[in-house]
Image (spheres, grey):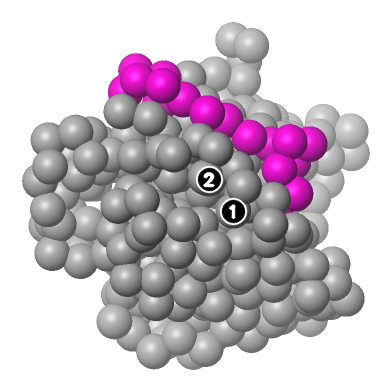
């Protein structure tokens, strides 16, 4: 089997890089070797690789900057995934793509399932929704995995930012009125590898193309920061603040808790508590 991994240096892509080699030939691209703003380059890479599976782990993730750079954000998150899916459909290949909780507006107060109405609040969410729609419109084999609040041992993410600030200042002010599900890149990678093995290797069909892939539980950004510091920086003082006290260019959903129930039923996604995954990540950081 031949796999094309797009975005191999991001948080999820870097985790996938080593794991996907076990399936056979792996062609990996990063920002320097594939500019997703150029449609011709995207088509060329797929046609040269002729993969059986395309895993798109690349994304424009600067949520606030996207409000001023919506065109670039839309090209990377919206148009490029659709092109990947069109080329995959021509080859009969499977596309695996990662999407986001930000396709929802946060007005709901119970967990969002895959069939709930979408209504993104900002440019980033709109671009990710366009990407989902483009993949489905291509009509080929696809798996769209929505997730949320992704973090890992590497790169820029909330866990590393909180630890850096905690160790430098000892005092944090963190938003407490936005609720979601922290998801480690390792957890998301495990689920992705399991799905590829199931669908592309064992040829077991799944009844749907869209799944929410998150661990068990929910918390606020303040609760997330509190748990990070409890485990790794216990002397830190953490003040809860409202979103209005920390204005940002892009609006965030106040509640974006995704329900992983469909994924548990259809392919056995484990019900791992998010706190356990955070502990694993912090332990890995400590060892590195």
Residue 64, magenta (yes or no): no
Q: Is 137 displayed left or right of 264 in the figure?
A: right
Image quadrant assignment for residue 125: bottom right
Residue 38 in view (yes/no) = yes
- Considering only vertical position in the picture, is 272 above or below 135? above
Q: Are marks 2 and 1 in contact (CB under 8 Å)?
A: yes
| 285 and 40: which is toward the camera | 40
User: At 22% across and 57% down in the image, what residue appears?
Assistant: 263
Residue 201: x %, y % from top left: 19, 33
Region of the chain picked out in magenta, as a range: 20-36
Residue 12: x %, y % from top left: 54, 39
Circle 1 Cα neighbour tier, 10 Å, few/some/many (<14 / 14–19 / ≥20): some
Q: Which mark is residue 53?
A: none
Image quadrant assignment for residue 90: bottom left
The C terminus, quarter of image = top right
Residue 143: x %, y % from top left: 33, 57
| Disc 2 to disc 1, C-alpha distance | 5 Å
- Considering only vertical position in the picture, is 268 above or below 241? above
Q: Is 156 displayed left or right of 288 in the figure?
A: right
| 41 and 8: which is toward the camera | 41
Which residue is the site of mark 1?
Answer: 43
Which residue is the site of mark 2?
Answer: 46
User: At 44% across and 39% down in the image, what residue appears?
Assistant: 50
The N terminus, quarter of image = top left
Q: Outermost residue toward the top? A: 287
Element under label 1? helix
How many marks the image carries: the answer is 2
Residue 185 in view (yes/no) = no
């Amino acid at each position: 089997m031949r796999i094309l991994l797009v975005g191999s240096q991001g948080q999820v892509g870097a985790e996938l890089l080593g794991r996907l080699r076990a399936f056979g030939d792996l062609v990996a691209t990063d920002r320097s070797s594939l500019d997703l703003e150029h449609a011709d380059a995207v088509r060329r890479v797929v046609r040269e690789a002729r993969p059986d599976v395309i895993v798109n782990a690349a994304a424009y993730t600067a949520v606030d900057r996207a409000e001023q750079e919506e065109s670039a954000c839309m090209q990377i998150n919206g148009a490029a995934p659709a092109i990947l899916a069109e080329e995959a459909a021509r080859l009969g290949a499977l596309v695996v793509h990662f999407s986001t909780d930000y396709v929802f507006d946060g007005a709901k107060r119970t967990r969002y399932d895959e069939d709930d109405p979408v209504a993104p609040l900002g440019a980033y969410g709109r671009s990710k929704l366009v990407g989902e729609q483009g993949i489905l419109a291509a009509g080929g084999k696809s798996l769209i995995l929505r997730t949320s609040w992704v973090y890992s041992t590497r790169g820029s993410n909330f866990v590393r930012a909180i630890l850096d600030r905690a160790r430098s200042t000892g005092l944090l002010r963190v938003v407490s009125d936005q609720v979601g599900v922290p998801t480690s890149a390792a957890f998301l990678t495990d689920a992705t590898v399991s799905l590829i093995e199931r669908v592309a290797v064992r040829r077991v069909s799944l009844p749907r193309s869209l799944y929410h892939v998150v661990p068990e539980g929910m918390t606020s950004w303040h609760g997330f920061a509190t748990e990070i510091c409890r485990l790794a920086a216990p002397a830190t003082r953490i003040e809860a603040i409202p979103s209005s006290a920390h204005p940002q260019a892009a609006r965030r959903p106040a509640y974006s808790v995704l329900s992983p129930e469909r994924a548990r039923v259809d392919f056995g996604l484990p019900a791992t508590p998010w706190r356990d995954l955070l502990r694993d990540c912090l332990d890995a950081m400590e060892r590195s």
